[in-house]
Image (spheres, rainbow, N blue to C red):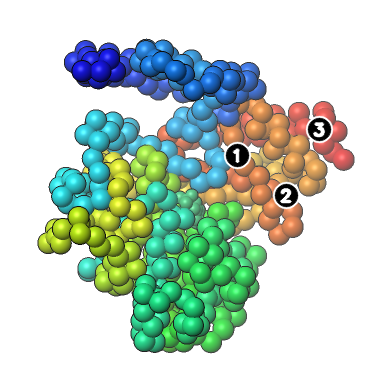
Amino acid sequence: MREFQKQFKSQIETKGPFELARRYAYAYMDTIGERNVFPAEQAIEGLRLFREEAFPDKPADPAAILNMLHTAGSPATVAQTGGRYFGFVNGGAVPVAVAAKWLADVWDQNGATYMTSPIASELESVCEGWLSGLFGLPQGTALGLVGGTSTATLCGLAAARNDLLLRMGWDANGKGLFGAPEIRVIVGGQAHASVFKALALIGLGKDRVCVVPADSQGRMIPERLPRLDHSTVLILQAGNVNTGAFDPLEELCSAATQAGAWVHVDGAFGLWAAASRTRAHLVRGLEKADSWSADAHKTLNAPYDCGIVLCRHRNALAAAMQATGAYIPPSSHRDGMQFTPEMSRRARSVELWATLKALGRTGVDALVEGLCQRAQQFARGLQDHGFRILNEVVFNQVLVACETPARTRWTLQALQASGTCWCGGTVWNDEPAMRVSVCSWATSTTDVDCCVQAFVEARAVASGKGGTA
Ligand SMILES: *Cc1c(COP(=O)(O)O)cnc(C)c1O
């Protein structure tokens, strides 16, 4: 046996590295509340340890590896599981789902096919049924598990492209797009960047789309919808990354269905509104669409990375993701790779299943409702302190501004440096704004109060810096 084989075997026997990782993980969990939400400069400076190390000639000791991650790596993490992180739409992580993911990491399954992992395959089927039910989607809806919504949207749009072309007598898989009939693509004025990325990747082009104007909240204006037909893909949005607003799905989906167009809904974080009694009205008509993309790692608080594509036309998704090879045996089981671009993948279904089971239907409802309530609390608290709220807070997003654009920018900078709380910036209706996204189960009402105070203090720091200019 080679030296490293002996060492690895002994690591499995003694569990040394695993025990150490467990200790460091616990230390991280126990100190999450004291950590800077965004790492301090000194912590980032500490990353030179990694940067300056040449690829080692010799094997390293497991304790040295884990220790380096713990002492130099963990201080440079974003403490997004702590409840005071409101950047992007990042979500939290349901603890037992993280634990299930650890367990599945030890299993090291390849989720490509039933043959590579019966358990991953079975749990995908279960999640497919549970999520179709939770979102109220038609029986037989297909699910694919990918890295995130960007890829999920890519899958939905690839299915749309191929299916529309097939109905026009064109085999896109075989012939590609050269000489194919035209596909019209219609998006809203506030479509997410990932939609354009997906369009570019699948050859539909991001600059030839027809853009339907959006209202002041970022919702597509149905009256401005152009003529639709059977060669059209209409891309709608459930949850705008800035305002949290939802396109009026019912009206738009009905128009599209009548015209024979394909509707894809980008519902990265907003699709989960369907699971909440008080918010389901925001996605009414959702079930009329043809395909959907969502992130379990956002609103649902599954660990990263867990994107979901759903498609009512099972065969259309499978046809777009087709792959055959002599070494891939025909299967009567569920092979996850039939519904995704990847073949080999992590068994994401394990943590998705664990998250859904940990919450149950009432738990998902309460989770979504809680995020929305905390967003409202945030908005009220900030307003009481003289901040301006730029959006209708219909879901979990709050757009905040000070009295002048300069003051907003300085306040955001001071807030991000505070370590107490972190949110990102954006530009909304030509005005700089701070974006608060409440998306972790861990955010309590006390956290919100404390973070409102952090905004007030950041604004005071900003004034000191001449932010009144
Ligand atoms: C986050 C987000 C995406 C991209 O999702 P990833 O998981 O980061 O790929 C797409 N659309 C919307 C509306 C989002 O919020």
Q: Position of residue 379 (x, y in %)?
A: 59, 45
The front one of 363 and 101 is: 101
Helix, strand or loop at label 3? It is helix
If you read the primary sequence from the N terminus, does the residue marked by circle 1 or circle 3 appear first? 1
Is 367 situated above or below 341? above
The front one of 326 and 430 is: 326
Is 189 situated above or below 193? below
Q: Residues within 10 Å of mark 3 (few under 14, many from 20)?
A: some
Residue 213: which quarter of the image? bottom right
Q: CA distance from mark 1 to mark 3?
A: 19 Å
Q: Position of residue 384 (x, y in %)?
A: 66, 41
Residue 158: which quarter of the image? bottom left
Residue sitting at x 25%, y 18%: 2
Q: Can see residue 441?
A: no
Residue highlighted by disc 2: 432
Residue highlighted by disc 3: 463
Q: Are marks 1 and 3 in contact (CB under 8 Å)?
A: no
Q: Position of residue 290 (x, y in %)?
A: 36, 72
What amino acid does circle 1 point to? Cys
Q: CA distance from mark 2 to mark 1?
A: 13 Å
Q: Quadrant of the C terminus?
A: top right
Name the front one of labels 1 and 3: 1
Residue highlighted by disc 1: 423
User: In the image, 401: left or right of 266?
Assistant: right
User: In the image, 48: left or right of 112?
Assistant: right
